[in-house]
Image: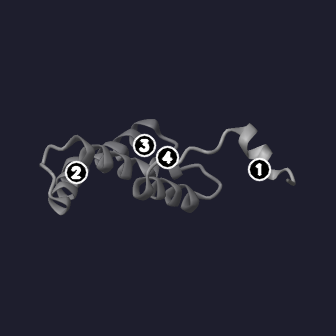
């Protein structure tokens, strides 16, 4: 990981599976082989590994990424809303 050229090469080798994964997702779900949602899902799933690198808890980062893939984005409540929920009523 300390050699940029090797790190980039490893990333390219990992990401070369993106099209095959997208096609497998499409086949599994009945989508068209060129469905952009399947391509995005494959890309995000493969990039989850890069997200985990350098984190204090890489497993938690991977879990968070795949939870997002499974359930979709759930934005956190705005700070003001969170603060009012914590005040005793």
Picture quadrant of residue 36: top left
> In the image as oriented, which residue stretches furthest toward the right?
88
Distance between mark 4 and mark 1 Cα atoms: 44 Å
Q: Residues within 10 Å of mark 1 (few under 14, many from 20)?
A: few
Residue that mark 2 sits on: 22
Q: Residues within 10 Å of mark 4 (few under 14, many from 20)?
A: few
Circle nearer the N terminus (2, 4) = 4
Q: Nearer the viewer, residue 53 or 23?
A: 23
Percent of width and height locating residue 33: 12, 49
Percent of width and height locating residue 48: 44, 51
Percent of width and height locating residue 55: 61, 51
Distance between mark 4 and mark 3 Cα atoms: 5 Å
Q: Nearer the viewer, residue 74 or 8?
A: 74
Q: Determine which of the numbered discs, if any, sits on residue 7 in the image.
A: 3
Callouts 4 and 1 close, C-beta under 8 Å: no
Q: Nearer the viewer, mark 3 or mark 1?
A: 1
Residue that mark 1 sits on: 85
Circle nearer the N terminus (4, 3) = 4
């Amino acid at each position: 990981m300390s050699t940029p050229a090797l790190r980039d090469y490893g990333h390219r080798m990992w990401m070369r599976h993106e099209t095959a994964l997208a096609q497998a997702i499409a086949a599994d779900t009945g989508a068209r082989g060129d469905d952009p949602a399947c391509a995005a899902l494959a890309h995000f799933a493969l990039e989850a590994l890069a997200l985990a690198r350098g984190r204090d808890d890489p497993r938690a980062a991977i879990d968070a990424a795949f939870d997002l893939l499974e359930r979709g984005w759930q934005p956190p409540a705005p700070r003001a809303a969170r603060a009012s929920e914590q005040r005793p009523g």
